[in-house]
Amino acid sequence: MSKTVLITGASRGIGAAVARRFAAAGWQVALHYHRSEAQALALARELNALPLRADVSDSAQVAAMAAEAVQRLGHLDALVCNAGIALPLGLVQDCSDSDWHRVFAVNVDGVFHTVRAVLPSMLARHSGSIVTLSSMWGQVGGSCEVPYSAAKGAVIAFTKALAQEVAPSGINVNCVAPGIIQTDMMAFADEDTLAALRADTPLGRLGTPEDVAGVVFGLCQPESSFVTGQVIGVNGGFVIT
Ligand code: NAP
């Protein structure tokens, strides 16, 4: 029986690389997306994956999406909560209520909705791996990214608490905290900004989605079954906690 994984936000960027990594190892992939339908459907065709649409900030849509994933794949060995958004850089006193609530609705509520929807099927089988995506700014805070840092810090606390709660049920839960990874999320940065970020990175380069995907995949392998409640930085040494 193939192993199975549900990956949120897998239409592009890090999530798409994670989907490719699992599929390359023979896993059956439930490939979640929201707005990028054409990209998601093309990737699903390429990987023979199951495309599923939902806005992760909407609990009813997520419940239906997770139920379909479990029903169509039979069970879920792993869940990767990757869907997320960032806000344009800005001072906290200029952040609107709606931007603040939106960054929490997608990054924090989205993780909660997805985990809550998937967990019963993992608890029933007494096994599973969950990986959440935070950010190095969730670990140490980033100037001009206060709402995003706060939301990603909440993801870390969520992960640690959940890891303790479900460990007796044979489920491990870990968090991956990327640094600067070249995806659409970094499209705001011009060449000078990217060069400065590269120079500030001890390993001397920016990250790729594949750098993150390899770590996420590794955390869902049997070799990692004794690892839980951990935050793994994938940041080239930019932040060492
Ligand atoms: P990205 O390229 O902007 O892709 C974001 C993904 O999230 C897309 O698949 C998007 O789906 C999905 N998404 C956004 N809003 C959604 C919603 N309301 N409901 C469902 N899905 C939604 O981002 P990325 O760079 O790959 O980032 C992936 C994760 O890593 C995020 O959690 C991000 O915070 C984190 N991260 C990224 C970096 C970085 O430098 N890139 C650094 C640290 C952490 P659609 O396109 O289909 O709408």
Image (spheres, grey):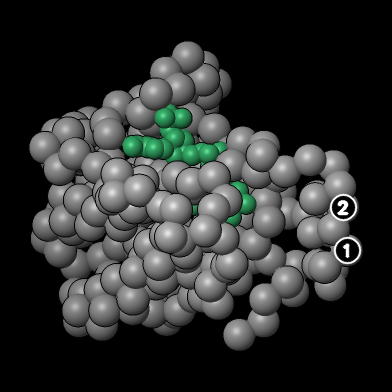
The C terminus sits in image quarter: bottom right
- State the residue in front, 46 or 177: 177
- State the residue in front, 101 or 3: 101
Direction from residue 65 to residue 20 in the image, left or right: right
**Place of residue 139 in the rendered image (x, y in percent of width and height, measured from the top left):** 51, 75
- State the residue in front, 234 or 241: 241
Callout 1 amino acid: Ala
Q: CA distance from mark 1 to mark 2?
A: 6 Å
Q: Quadrant of residue 61?
A: top left
Q: Does residue 86 appear anywhere in the picture?
A: yes
**Place of residue 129 in the rendered image (x, y in percent of width and height, measured from the top left):** 35, 63
Q: Mark 1 — residue?
A: 199
The reply to whether discs 1 and 2 touch (Cβ–Cβ < 8 Å) is: yes
- State the residue in front, 201 or 210: 201
Tally of numbered tags = 2
Q: Is residue 37 above or below residue 171?
A: above
Q: Secondary structure at mark 1?
A: helix
Q: Mark 2 — residue?
A: 195
Q: Quadrant of residue 104?
A: bottom left
**Callout 1 environment at 10 Å: few (<14), some (14 to 19), or many (20+)?**
some
Callout 2 amino acid: Ala
Direction from residue 86 to residue 120 in the image, left or right: left
